[in-house]
Image (cartoon, rainbow, N blue to C red):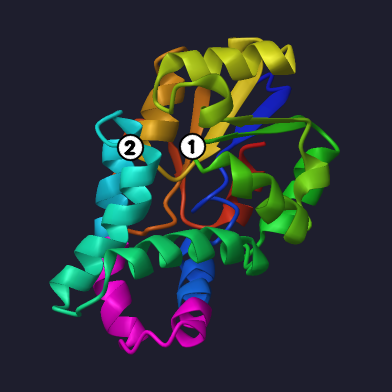
C-alpha cells in the first residue's frame, strides 16, 4: 500500500477509555462521598457520554456543556439528588484524575513497537487537549508519536476534513502514503476517507458493522496489513 505515515486515534483505539473512566469514577465518588452504585451509574453514563461526544463533534454543544450535562443527565436518570456545585466539582476532578489510570488495549504497545520500525506515527484526537498528552506520557506511549494533533489546537473536530489536512501538513505526509486507524466510523474512518486516506477500523466496541474499511477486532490483527 506504500504507507509511510500512520495516524492513530487515541481514546477507544489505543487508550482503554471505558476501563480508565470507570476507575476514575470509582476514585472520585469515594473521595467525594457520592453514594451511588458504580455499575448502575456507568450503565447510564456510558451511552449518555457517547451521545454528548457526538453532539460535541457536530459542534452542537460546547466542551463545558458536555462536561456538565453528561454527569447531570446521568444522575437525573438515577433520580439521585446532587447539587450543580457538586456536579461542576466532579466534572473538574474527573478530568484531573483521568490520566492517572492508564490501561491500554491488549496488544497496543506490542503493535506500536512493531510499527515504529517501519512507519512514522502520529495522533489525531478529539479528546480534551489538557489531558491527552498526560494520558500518553503516563501510559508510556508518547515517545512513539511524532505529531500530536488535537481538535482544540486546530479549531475543528474529526470528521471535519480540515483536521486531517492539517495533520498531513504537520507530518509532511501525502494522502496516498497515509493510513488512519480508529474506532469511530464517523469521525475516524469516514472522516479520513473523505480526503482520500486509507483506513483501518478498530471495532473496539464490538457492535458496529462496517463494509467500507479494513476491520479488525484486535489490535494485533493490524500487523497483517502493515
Please state, as top left, top right, bottom left or bottom right, where the N terminus lies in the image.
top right
Instruction: Tell me if 7 is positioned left or right of 18 in this view.
Output: right
Query: Which residue is rendered at x = 57% and y = 46% of the image?
Result: 10
Q: Quadrant of residue 65?
A: top left
Using the rendered image of the protein, determine whether residue 210 is visible from the camera's viewpoint: no
Give the overall secondary structure of the magenta segment: helix
Q: In which quarter of the image is residue 143?
A: top right
Tag 2 secondary structure:
helix
Residue 77 at x, y percent in the picture: 15, 71
Tag 1 secondary structure:
loop
Residue 135 at x, y percent in the picture: 66, 55
Number of numbered callouts drawn: 2
Query: Which residue is rendered at x = 50% and y = 30% of the image?
Result: 199
Q: Let me know if residue 37 is in the magenta part.
A: yes
Foreground residue among 211 and 179: 179
Please state, as top left, top right, bottom left or bottom right, where the C terminus lies in the image.
top right
Q: Give the range drawn in magenta.
A: 26-47
Residue 73 at x, y percent in the picture: 20, 62
Pointer 1 residue = 126
Residue 203 at x, y percent in the picture: 42, 51
Label 1 near label 2: C-beta < 8 Å? yes
Q: Let me know if residue 207 is in the magenta part.
A: no
Using the rendered image of the protein, determine whether residue 5 is visible from the camera's viewpoint: yes
Foreground residue among 8 and 57: 57
Pointer 2 residue = 56
Mark positioned earlier in the residue sequence (2 or 1):
2
Amino acid at each position: 500500500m506504500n504507507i509511510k505515515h500512520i495516524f492513530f486515534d487515541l481514546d477507544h483505539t489505543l487508550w482503554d477509555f471505558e476501563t480508565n473512566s470507570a476507575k476514575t469514577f470509582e476514585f472520585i465518588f469515594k473521595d467525594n462521598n457520592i453514594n451511588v452504585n458504580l455499575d448502575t451509574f456507568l450503565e447510564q453514563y456510558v451511552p449518555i457520554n457517547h451521545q454528548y461526544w457526538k453532539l460535541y463533534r457536530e459542534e452542537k454543544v460546547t466542551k463545558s456543556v458536555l462536561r456538565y450535562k453528561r454527569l447531570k443527565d446521568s444522575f437525573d436518570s438515577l433520580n439521585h439528588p446532587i447539587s450543580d456545585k457538586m456536579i461542576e466539582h466532579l466534572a473538574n476532578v474527573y478530568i484531573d484524575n483521568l490520566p492517572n489510570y492508564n490501561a491500554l488495549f491488549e496488544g497496543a504497545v506490542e503493535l506500536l513497537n512493531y510499527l515504529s520500525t517501519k512507519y512514522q506515527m502520529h495522533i489525531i484526537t478529539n479528546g480534551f487537549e489538557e489531558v491527552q498528552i498526560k494520558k500518553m506520557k503516563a501510559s508510556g506511549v508518547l515517545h512513539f508519536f511524532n505529531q500530536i494533533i488535537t481538535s482544540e489546537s486546530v479549531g475543528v473536530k474529526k470528521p471535519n476534513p480540515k483536521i486531517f489536512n492539517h495533520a498531513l501538513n504537520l507530518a509532511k505526509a501525502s494522502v496516498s502514503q497515509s493510513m488512519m486507524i480508529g474506532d469511530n466510523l464517523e469521525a475516524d474512518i469516514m472522516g479520513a476517507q473523505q480526503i482520500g486516506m486509507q483506513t483501518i477500523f478498530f471495532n473496539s466496541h464490538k457492535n458496529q458493522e462496517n463494509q467500507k474499511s479494513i476491520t479488525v477486532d484486535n489490535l494485533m490483527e493490524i500487523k497483517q496489513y502493515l
